[in-house]
Amino acid sequence: MSAVLNAVDLTLTQAAQEKMTELFQDVDDTVQGVRVFATAGGCSGVSFGMTFTDAINDEDAILEFESFKVVVDDGTLDYLRGVEIDFIDQDDGNATFVFNNLPKIGGGCQSCGSSTSGGGCS
């Protein structure tokens, strides 16, 4: 059975919650939630991403909101504890989700060319 995430594990700002609610109005009924995942790379050693998912596994943890679910696999959860997901809509028309309070996993920026939003190299 899936575990329940709480605010200690992962939080979403009001802007991120509003954008997720908007995005979930346009998806079909097979979408179960948005999966947050970690991949190797970036200055901290880990980069994060999000994608819609049509499956929730027993090992996944879930942060449930009124109109959507955030799904995190067991391996990614350790990297996300204390992270806040925000949504930034800039004046120039660019908009993105950013991950704040990222853990310091690696040894700092080495001009790697691959960074995580909201916490990597610039």
Image: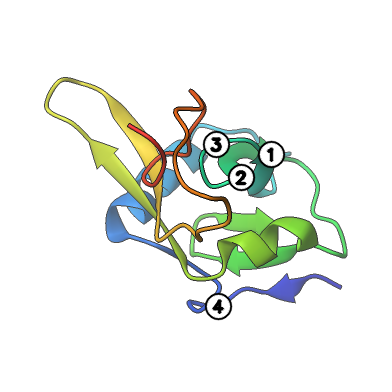
Residue located 76% across and 41% down the image: 54
Q: CA distance from mark 2 to mark 1?
A: 5 Å
CB of mark 3 within 8 Å of CB of mark 2? yes
The residue lying toward the viewer, choosing from 18 and 83, is: 83
Residue located 44% across and 39% down the image: 109
Q: What amino acid is at disc 1?
A: Ala
Element at label 3 = loop
CB of mark 4 within 8 Å of CB of mark 3? no
Q: Is residue 32 above or below residue 114?
A: below
Q: CA distance from mark 2 to mark 4?
A: 22 Å
The residue lying toward the viewer, choosing from 112 and 34, is: 112
Q: Is residue 82 above or below residue 68?
A: below
Query: Label 2: which residue?
Result: 46
Query: Label 3: which residue?
Result: 42
Q: What amino acid is at disc 2?
A: Val
Can you say which quadrant of the picture contains the N terminus? Answer: bottom right
CB of mark 2 within 8 Å of CB of mark 1? yes
> From this viewpoint, is residue 93 visible?
yes
Q: CA distance from mark 4 to mark 3?
A: 26 Å
Q: Is residue 12 above or below residue 108?
A: below
Query: What label does residue 40 carry, if any?
Result: 1
Residue density around tag 1, few if under 14, some if 14–19, many if 20 or more, within 10 Å: few
Residue density around tag 4, few if under 14, some if 14–19, many if 20 or more, within 10 Å: some
Q: Position of residue 46 (x, y in %)?
A: 61, 45
Q: CA distance from mark 4 to mark 1?
A: 25 Å
Query: Label 4: which residue?
Result: 6
Left of 92 or right of it: where is 78? Answer: right
Q: Which label's residue is closer to the chain start, 4 or 1?
A: 4
Element at label 2 = strand
